[in-house]
Amino acid sequence: MIDLSGAILRKANLRNTVWGDHCRWQEANFSGSDFTGINNESSCVFVRCNFSNTIWDQADLWQSSFVDCTSTNANFDDAKFSEVRFTSESSFFGY
């Protein structure tokens, strides 16, 4: 598992990147980042991450979870989300 918890990636250019299986991001700041064309293999978990003002145009995510994340003004134009969960921490972790 790749664990990049607490990473600061404000305004990062992540266009067309491929993310491996089972990556975990906790309290990472992606505000203003560009995820255009991103593709993840499966099972990325984002917990309390900031996705404000991000671009997800043509992103392809599969079996990923966004738990208590902020996505104010995020642009999901033409994004493909398959089996993606947007949920609260209490329901995701079962408490």
Image (tube, grey):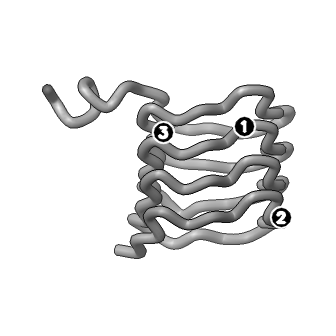
Secondary-structure class at tag 2: loop
Q: Please give left or right for residue 1 compared with residue 53 in the image.
A: left
Residue 94 placed where, x, y %?
16, 29
> What crowding class fits label 3: few (fewer than 14 Cα within 10 Å), some (14-19), or many (20 or more)?
many
Task: Name the residue rendered at 79%, 43% in the picture.
Answer: 54
Q: Is residue 38 above or below residue 82?
A: below
Q: Is residue 55 above or below residue 35?
A: above
Pointer 2 residue: 15
Q: Is residue 49 above or below residue 4?
A: above
Q: CA distance from mark 3 to mark 1?
A: 13 Å
Pointer 3 residue: 66
> For residue 93, what is the image quadrant?
top left
- Residues at marks 2 and 3 touching, judged by CB atoms closer than 8 Å: no
Q: Residue lying farthest left?
A: 95
Kind of residue at disc 3: Phe
Secondary-structure class at tag 3: strand
The C terminus appears in which quarter of the rendering? Answer: top left
Q: CA distance from mark 2 to mark 3?
A: 19 Å
- Residues at marks 2 and 1 touching, judged by CB atoms closer than 8 Å: no
Residue 9 placed where, x, y %?
69, 64
Residue 34 placed where, x, y %?
83, 55
Task: Name the residue rendered at 79%, 54% in the picture.
Answer: 33
Q: Which mark is residue 52?
A: 1
